[in-house]
Amino acid sequence: MPNGHGGSVRFFPVIVLLVILGTMLVVYRKAATPWVLYAGYGFAALLGERLSHHLHRWKVEEYDGAYYSDPEKARVRKVYLAAAALYVIAAVATWHFLAA
């Protein structure tokens, strides 16, 4: 694709993961099956990582990073990793309190 993303729509994986987690929450509350609760933690962690990627690394990865220098890429990677850790913790904690 000309925009360098291979046709990937911004925030699409995040929206899909939110729909999956919402569906899992409804299933867990109706059927109370513990495997749905535990699988939700994994999806919540993935949601936090994908959210961080789409918020902090999206622009840098356009055109394979051709418009950014190596120091800028390194700085963005550090911000992405720090934010990913925070977003994963927040998403897992949110899942824990919503499903409890």
Image: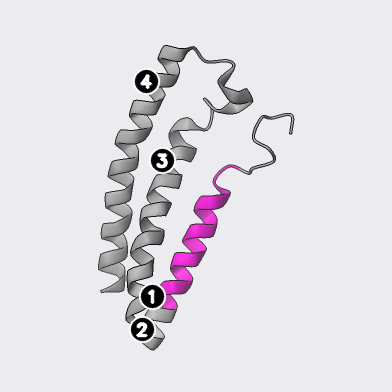
Residue where numbered disc 4 is placed:
75
Q: Name the residue rendered at 32%, 49% in the picture.
A: 88
In three-dimensional space, the C-alpha distance between marks 4 and 1, rounded to whole angstroms, equals 37 Å
Q: What's the amino acid at mark 3?
A: Ser
Q: Quarter of the image containing the C terminus? A: bottom left
Residue 21 belongs to the span the image colors magenta? yes
In the depicted structure, whether residue 4 falls above or below residue 97 = above
Q: Name the residue rendered at 37%, 66% in the picture.
A: 40
Q: Earlier in the sequence, mark 3 or mark 1?
A: 1
In three-dimensional space, the C-alpha distance between marks 4 and 3, rounded to whole angstroms, equals 14 Å
* Residue 4, quarter of picture: top right
Magenta segment: 10-26
Residue where numbered disc 1 is placed:
36
In three-dimensional space, the C-alpha distance between marks 2 and 3, rounded to whole angstroms, equals 30 Å
Residue 44 belongs to the span the image colors magenta? no
In the depicted structure, whether residue 84 falls above or below residue 76 = below
Q: Evaluate if marks 2 and 1 touch, with contact meaning CB atoms under 8 Å apart.
A: yes
Q: Total label count?
A: 4
Image location (x, y in percent) of residue 90: 28, 52
Residue where numbered disc 2 is placed:
33
Nearest the viewer among 8 and 18 is 8
Q: Earlier in the sequence, mark 2 or mark 4?
A: 2
**Comparing marks 2 and 3, which lies closer to the viewer?**
2
SS class, disc 3: helix
